[in-house]
Image (cartoon, rainbow, N blue to C red):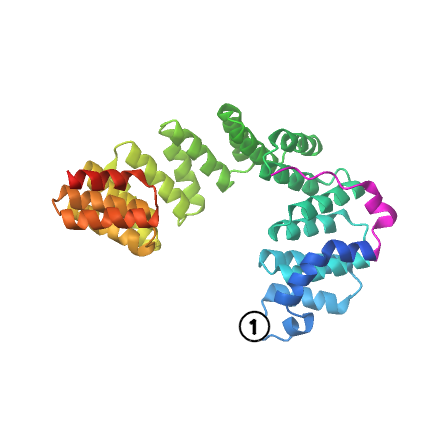
Amino acid sequence: MQVYEWLAFSLFMNMINRTFRLLCLLPLLIFSCKHGETEKAISTKANTPAALQELNQKINAEPKNASYYNERAKYYYTQKDLGAASKDILDAITLDSSKAEFYVTLSDIFFAGGKSAQSKRSLDKSLLLDPANKEALLRMAELYLYVKDNKKSIEYLDKVLKIDVNTPKAYFIKGMDFKEMGDTTKAISSFQTTIEQDVEYYNAYVQLGLIYAARRNPLALKYYENALKLDPKSIEVMYNTAMFLQENNQLNKAIELYTKILSIDPQNKYANYNLGYIHYEYLKVFGEAVKHFSNAITCDPKYAEAVYMRGLCYEAMGDVQRASADYTQALVIAPGYEKPMLGLKRLAE
């Protein structure tokens, strides 16, 4: 994806007139008409959350206070109601177009709606109004990370850190940039600095775990453990931990953890698949492996790898008919898949 060109300053002259605001927000306004609720409808709901009730009351008391509309737009954004969020941020900007933070909110809404170009233009406007707006600089860095222009992302992060050296998120994004650039040493340093700044930065522990796991370094387990302390039911971290244990021949612990994952998420096809793989590849308990691969297929009938692996189990058990059926089915799901082709060739010999 190409980085979008900077919007010409002429669009922003005279503090963004109403016509420009309407044009800028048109995609979200259309979305709002389709999916949003009117303010009146929201306020009359008996089950309106307390936080939203409080914001509604503030707006009713001070309908000309632009900041309250921005606050409610951010609330709707967190609830994934982009239609209602877009309506409120339009009202905020209509009331006061001079607030840089309003355009940061607008940028978030555009980005969540898959509109990167509009998101960047909103950040441009925010930084035009306030070049030292830390949130706008961070969002710009994230946007450039998203489009894989890592050097540009780092430029914005350096600006953030000049403003406030104690910004954990800046170090985290920088770590992601270095990781994508292939410099895992600098990535580790950045993620560790993130944790020094904020010992509860979950994603930094996850990233450190992934990097050390790729190096087959047992430190990965320590970082995963710290992440699980912050989120004890994280399927992501449990799965990553189990994979590390599996790849480093700690099979009983891996089985225990995959089983725990399935107790939380029975439809996790990857945990089912990996249990099948362990029983097939390492333990040679083919009947048990078939059960796990079958569970994975139940979770996702188009899981070609699981169908193929179940075929391998049947082949190892001498059940040629079922093995052939699975190999054939794997090819139906994924034409050109070489392994089941070879399996059918073996059975025909």
Q: Is residue 257 above or below residue 196?
A: below
Q: Nearer the viewer, residue 195 or 320?
A: 320
Query: In this view of the protein, can residue 285 be seen by the observer?
Result: no
Q: Which residue is drawn at 84% across and 43% down?
A: 10
Q: In this view, does 286 lie above or below 250?
A: below
Query: In this view of the protein, can residue 153 be seen by the observer?
Result: yes
Q: Would residue 3 be counted in the magenta stretch? A: yes
**Residues in magenta?**
1-18
Residue 139: quarter of image:
top right
Few, some or many residues within 10 Å of mark 1 (<14, 14–19, 20+) = few
Quadrant (top left, top right, bottom left, bottom right) of the C terminus: top left
In the rendered image, which residue does mark 1 sit on? Answer: 47
Q: State left or right for residue 323 relative to residue 195.
A: left
Q: Nearer the viewer, residue 200 or 317?
A: 317
Q: Which residue is the extreme one toward the right?
A: 14
Q: State left or right for residue 16 relative to residue 69.
A: right
Residue 300: x %, y % from top left:
34, 54
Q: Would residue 171 be counted in the magenta stretch? A: no
Q: Residue at x 63, y 49 (%)?
A: 111
